[in-house]
Amino acid sequence: MTPFNMSRFMRESEAFTHDDLKLQALMRAALVDVVSQIDVAHDDTAYIKTGDIPASWLRDASVQVRYLLFFADDPEIARLLRSVILYQARRILLDPYANAFVEGPRVREYPWEPEQQGVWERKFEIDSLAHPILLAWSYWKVTGDTSIFTSETKNALELAISTLMLEQDHGDSQYKFESDTERAGSNPVSKETGMIWSGFRPSDDVCIYNFPIAQQMQAVAALGALGDIALHAYRDNSLLDKAQKLRQEVYAGIETHGIIHDRSGERMYAYEVDGLGNAVSFDDANFGLLSAPYFGFVAVDNLVYQATRRFILSKQNPHYFTGSVGSGIGSPHTPDGWIWPLGLAMEGLTTDDPLEHQRILDLLVASDRGNHALPESFDANDVRDYTREEFGMPHALFVEFYLTKFLGRPALPMPNTEDLRVSR
């Protein structure tokens, strides 16, 4: 494959100026961050590393390149996006349960690691299938380019939906994951929720209860996109019917089992449920409940979402932290008291309040330790303490946040659930 010409990004980066020189430096670096993560895969598609880990997560890569849609009028950027979409289709066909892939053979260190060449990690997460579908759909909606909808892509979409349908009743599945420290599916779940079983969270941590509500929301969005693709790109009524049916069942499951009550009696979304009456209440900065409007699942002013948001951004959420630097959502994946820039950017993307936009922007700029890179997380009292210096997703989401909330660029397309709400 001819190397990608990323000169457009270099020009965009160099052209960005601001009176706040720290913001200018951070934005310039974020605009071109994905360039350093691009590699050519063995099948001449585009392989996007997650950062300092030499593997490509389907979710992460989809997020890392999504902001490129703002610049997809450039032929080289469009070519890169097409190559990423094809890469992901081929990896789903390789193993629909894998969440991360690597180029070339991997040296196995532990007996539970996958033996299949090209698979880095086999932690089944619903969003590993949802994000590639949404990326392909969004690319189509922005560019009008249907060349991505090949027979190979269709095979991947069909395998993705058949996997999701199978996992509505995990008892029928052959998938399992067990290591020295983690075992997926330790707790029983109901077989009759309509929702999709997931072994792991977006943080790659094992689920307590295996119906994570935020991932169900992302599945609803992806299934809406898949139905649109089936109808207009492939004209396949069978695939359309499967997507619509599963979408309706997952949505109904969220409405029936995924809504609990907070301390004041208000209805809010749980983080995970088992469909048997058990739930855990918190949020994780890695595409958790806070992101529901971002994926078009609800409007920002939805009452259940607003109650959930108040809970998330308060001390009631055990993973919301406040320190001398600022406040934000963290994760059980990282130390207590540490904030994720990824969560800050999502907090900004899911509010219409300009004062909040500015507060979040100031905090993101303050988290720059001088190297113009946003880490995975940082200590709310000292940004010099952090995890994962090279982590691609927060840079991409930061660009999307700034372009839409400060420069007035229209939000990138996402499906919505308005038709489902009307039907209920």
Image (cartoon, grey):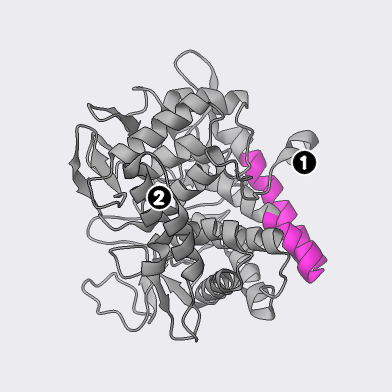
Q: Which residue is mark 1?
A: 419
Q: Is residue 212 visible?
A: no
Q: Is residue 311 visible?
A: yes
**394 w.r.t. 233: above or below:** above
* Amino acid type, label 2: Met
* Amino acid type, label 1: Asp
User: Which of 274/231 is in front?
Assistant: 231
| Residue in the image at 47% along x and 23% along y | 310
Tell me the SS state at disc 2. Answer: helix
Report which quarter residue 302 is drawn in.
top right
Looking at the image, residue 194 sits to the left or right of residue 37; the answer is right
Disc 1 crowd, CA 10 A, few/some/many (<14, 14-19, 20+): few
Tell me the SS state at disc 1. Answer: helix
Looking at the image, residue 272 sits to the left or right of residue 382; the answer is right
User: Which of 15/1 is in front?
Assistant: 15
Report which quarter residue 323 is drawn in.
top left
First in sequence, mark 2 or 1: give its number: 2
Q: Tag on residue 27?
A: 2
Task: Give how far across and how far down residue 113 sits, in percent.
Answer: 30, 71
